[in-house]
Every structure is written in structure tokens, then in C-alpha cells.
Amino acid sequence: MATFPDNNRTVQILRRASEGDYAVGAYNCYNDDGIIAVIRAAENCKSPAIIQVFPWTIKFQGPHFVRYAVEAAHSASVPIAVHLDHCIEPEDVKAALELPFDSIMVDASTLDPDENIRNCREIVRIANARGIAIEAEMGRIEGGEDGLPTVDMEAIMTRPDLARSFVQETGVQFLAPAFGNIHGKYGPGGPRASWRLPLLMDVHKAIPHIPLVLHGTQGVSDESFQETRRYGMVKVNLNRIVRDEYSEFVSQNAGKLELTALKERGVEIYIKSIERTMREVLGSAGKA
């Protein structure tokens, strides 16, 4: 019988993506519509996928919702993992480690580098013993007014040599580097004006065995998504890019349609948005 990390679902999905030269969408879900849409889209496309929730989910919808998401994902006919995104507070990490997540993103990027390493190393030790893989972020760039970053971009970007030592010292399974990608809205010129792709390639070359994770995908073009694959990005976080059409439909039709019809038609729209990314952007369709 396989042992960790070989038996971990997120590790398996991203390892196959790295070997198969495609990327996998990690879709942020806020309710059962999102969970259903990701699973059905993945099954329709015969694609692997990752369902992502936030610590908000544990607090608002409760641990039973997480268990539902995991059971539904693991019962699908294609490989689907469930991941906790941006887990910042220590109490959230503690709660998450008691739940059946396949992987957790530990966001200690606001700490100083040494504290980030100590924090991640201890969480990795506990999580890996429980079969949970860990993603960490090195540097977090927030979009401020008009999308302009609120920090010194150059100072916070991931250095390749530090990425190598961070991975070695913490033992994390996946890394989300900062290379000019912004959480939230990008400024004038969009992502391409902000991204430092040569830096991203240097990070990839420094840790070629570690799957890289793309955060900050609002406003990113299909072509730019596809280009990042050459730089080691195999886990691509997707939120509004697949959710906006669904949200618009719900907002326009809430109160006009019966709730059952609203959910069914809304989920169908959601499914089509996700399927498009699997077929036309990530190259994951047909890989399951």
C-alpha cells in the first residue's frame, strides 16, 4: 500500500499534471452549487480538478460541509481533491488539520521569513503525518486602489535561492511564488505588465521537482495562463473567472425563478464556464 506523499490525492493530481505537461484548475467554491459544478464539469471533460474552500467555509458552513465536499469529490468518476486555501490564523490551521482535507495552503506570507519557515515546518510535520499535503506562499502582493500594489514589488518577490532553501527547510509539497502576480485587481497594463516571467523561470529551475501554484488570476488571458505552464505552474487557482457568469445569472433571476430552477440553471452556467477552462485553457480535459 502506498504511503504519504504517494497516496495523497492532491500530490497525485499535480504530479501527473507535471509529467503530462498540463495544468489543473483549483476552483474556489463558496456553496454547494460550486461543488456540484466542479464535479460535473470534471466528469464531463474527463479532467482532474481541485475544489478549494476558504477558512470562511469552516466557520460559516461548518465542518460537516467540508466533509460533504470531500465525500462528493472523492466519489467522482475522475480524480478530484479538496484543498483549503489561504489558511492564515493558527486556530483555522488547527481546525483544518482535524478535517479530511487533501491539502492545505498555509498562508504565513505576512510573517518575517524566518518565522514563516518555522511556522510552515511545524505545520508540515503535523499535516504530513495525517496524510495532508501543504502548500505555502512566499510573498503576497495585494492589489490596492486601481490595482496598484500596496508594497514594494521588488522587495517581496520570491528569490530563487530562498525558494530552494524554504522548500528544503520546511518540506512543503507545493509553492506559490510571488513574481508580480497580484491578489485582486491588476493595475494599468494588466497581469503582463506586472509579471516577471524570467524570475518565475528561475524559481522553477531552482526547485524543478516542486509543483508551483498560480495565485492572482483575475484578468489573466487564456494565452498567459497557457504560457505559465512552461514556467512550472501546474496548479492554477480560479475564482471569478469561472464564477462571474453564474453570479450574474443568479443576481438577475433571484425572485423570478423558483429556487430549484434557479439552482439548476445556475449550476449549468457554472459548469460551462469551468468546462471551458479545462478544454481551452489548462489542457486538463481528457487527462483523467
Image (spheres, grey):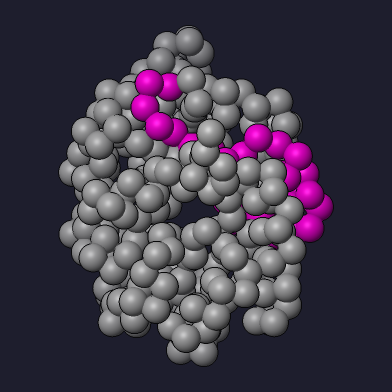
Residue 224 at least partly seen:
no
Q: Is residue 202 above or below residue 60?
A: below
- Relative side of 131 to 206, left or right: right
Q: Is residue 145 above or below residue 249?
A: below
- Relative side of 73 to 107, left or right: left
How many marks on residues? 0
Query: Is 192 inside the magenta-drawn segment?
Result: no
Q: Residue furthest front?
A: 1
Query: Is 87 inside the magenta-drawn segment?
Result: yes
Q: Is residue 25 above or below residue 41?
A: below
Residue sitting at 62 percent across and 46 percent down?
132
> Picture quarter containing residue 111?
bottom right
Q: Which quadrant is the C terminus positioned in?
A: top left
Q: Nearer the viewer, residue 172 or 38?
A: 172
> Picture quarter containing residue 227?
bottom left
Residue sitting at 28 percent across and 82 percent down?
198
Which residues are drawn in magenta? Answer: 76-104
- Relative side of 264 to 119, left or right: left
Which percent across, then down, holds residue 280?
18, 43
Which percent across, then down, holds residue 173?
52, 59
Residue sitting at 67 percent across and 74 percent down?
117
Q: Nearer the viewer, residue 70 or 263?
A: 70
Which percent across, then down, holds residue 251?
45, 31
Residue 137 at least partly seen:
yes
Which percent across, then down, holds residue 286?
21, 33
Residue sitting at 65 percent across and 51 percent down?
128
